[in-house]
Amino acid sequence: MTVDDPNINEAKVKPTSTISRIWIIPILVIVIGGWMVYYQWKNQGPLITIELNSATGIEVNKTPIKVRDLDIGQVKKITLMPDLNGVLVTARIDASAAHLLNENAKFWVVAPRISFSEVSGLNTLLSGSYIAMSAHEQGKEQLHFTALERPPVTPPGTPGLHVMLKSDDEFAYKPGDPIIYKGFKVGEFEDAAFNIEERVVYYDAFIEAPYHKLITNTTRFWDVSGVKLLLESKGVSVETGSLETLLANGITFGIPDGVPKGEQVLDNAFFTIYEDGTAASDARYKVAAEYLLLIDESVRGLTVGAPVEYRGIEIGNVTAINSFSALEGNILERDYPIPVLINIYPGKARQPDTEEGLNAIKQTIRNWLERDLRASLRMGNVLTGGLYVDLQHIPDADASSHIEVLNGYEIIPTVSNEFTQLTQKADAILDKINQLPLKEMVENVQLAVEDMRLAAESVETASSDFDLLIADIDAKALNSNLNQVLVSLDGLLKNYSEGGFNQSEIKETVDALQETMRNIQPLLLKLNQSPNSLIFSNDDEADIQPKAKD
């Protein structure tokens, strides 16, 4: 076969493809992956930074960000802050929760926490710590936050009322301490801050619904922490709140008796925490009349806050003792009276708590002072020794035409109390006892005791001699003689009982004696009627002849 053979067809040469079909799959993967990366980049949430005190329990790409236990982000980076005062956590938030990142959002670390007032976060012992976020849809957008040091006491979104409280007393509260109303826990303290300039502690507290409706503009708050043993002039009293306030501090609230209910307050209303219920009730009185007492005796047992009473009704209290604004000087000076300032409230005397009521009280006191009103310190309770101020009318008091005023205070004259009077009487009795001749009396008593001692010695000597005399008696001879007497007596009784000779003789003798008595009976009768008949005879009367027995 040759090439020139016409029956042979020529081969057709075609070029091969430059791109293999196998490349379609990787290209498709690249396209899909790129689209996914683009979609993820386009739809990813923002990065936020959170300042924390420490990174305890926080791990990169593991610790979640949660809102109501729903994951909305994750920690991506942890770095130290430039000033080394904490750590800066960078976290990625899901786009679906980006609208929650505003100025009202709060972050805190949820970890196991055990304290005196709470136990929380125990569920993180197995799952690990996480960063919680409080959600709020309104507010200006924000991407940098400072985490709270502890979880908020009130969960976000809880219905109720936030109030601001102030206290300048010696008790303090911490977040989580309860607010009690009639034994029920109705709220908690959320935060506390101390104002150094004012030296006052301010608190944020929350009252849960529906109890927040009890808070009005006339509501008063006071302390009920632990157990209070009050030793006052009124006596001994014990105050306590509830079992929870026995272990931690707490407060309660209420409306004082006689005060209108008032109107409900708005959020963040301001209130003061008082020491006790009495102080909270007295806070409603706005005006008071001030008076000065000059005490010449001891004021031991009288305290600031002690009641001022008139006819057993409390109308005021003691506001200051030995105040320099009332009287200059000091107690070391001779005849220095101790100044005591008191307040009298028109509201407690059933007068209007206004300037008109105050003027009425002042005018009444002036009229009484010009006549017989006096003040004295009286003991309210023997056990505590507490004193109170008693205003009373003294019938024999010296009337005064004018009222003394010292440093702007009207003076109420004072009289000695019953304790001072008893002391004076006791001193007088002791003076009389001291005047007795006790020395001579003691000497006489000593002489009498000496005589009694000598007499006792004589009795003891006579007793000893008697013992010796008894010892000298022959007991055996005495017993023998007694036995002989008993034998003779026994024989005599036997002889008489057997009817012997002695018995017949005795019977004859008795019969003769009876006959003789009958014979001399007329003679005895004569002598009884005429005692002188034996000397002077009477011929007119016949002699009474005795008659023989028939």
Image (spheres, rainbow, N blue to C red):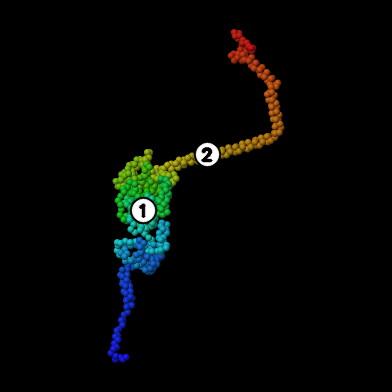
Q: Which circle marks residue 186 in the picture?
A: 1
In the image, is 437 to the left or to the right of 106?
Answer: right
What's the residue type where badge 1 is placed?
Val
Picture layout, residue 523 above or below residue 330: above
Residue 286 location, x and y as percent?
32, 49
Q: Camera-side residue: 212 or 253?
A: 212
Figure disc tally: 2
The image quarter containing residue 463 is top right
Quadrant occupied by the C terminus = top right
Residues at marks 2 and 1 touching, judged by CB atoms closer than 8 Å:
no
Is there any visible trace of residue 373 in the rendered image? yes
Question: Could you tell me if residue 299 is visible in this image?
Answer: no
Dot 2: within a 10 Å radius of its alpha carbon, few (fewer than 14), some, or many (20 or more) residues?
few
- CA separation, marks 2 and 1? 76 Å
Which of the two residues, 282 or 102, is positioned nearer the viewer here? 102
Residue 255 picture location, percent across and down: 34, 49
* 141 horizontally vs 548: left or right: left
- Residue with the mark numbered 2: 437
**Quarter of the image where one finds residue 531:** top right
- The image shows residue 338, relative to residue 477, as above or below, that is below
Give x and y (percent) for residue 201.
37, 56
Q: Residue at x 42, y 51 (%)?
A: 227
Q: Is residue 491 above or below residue 399?
A: above
Identified by mark 2, the residue type is Pro
Q: Nearer the viewer, residue 148 or 332?
A: 148
Tag 1 or tag 2, which sits nearer the N-term?
Answer: 1
Q: What secondary structure is found at the residue carrying circle 1?
A: strand
> Is residue 481 rendered to the left or right of residue 521?
right
User: Percent x, y for residue 219?
Assistant: 33, 51
At numbered mark 2, what does the secondary structure look like: helix, strand or loop? loop
* Crowd tier of the residue under label 1, counting other residues whose Cα lies within 10 Å: few below 14, some 14–19, many 20 or above: some
Q: Residue furthest left?
A: 6
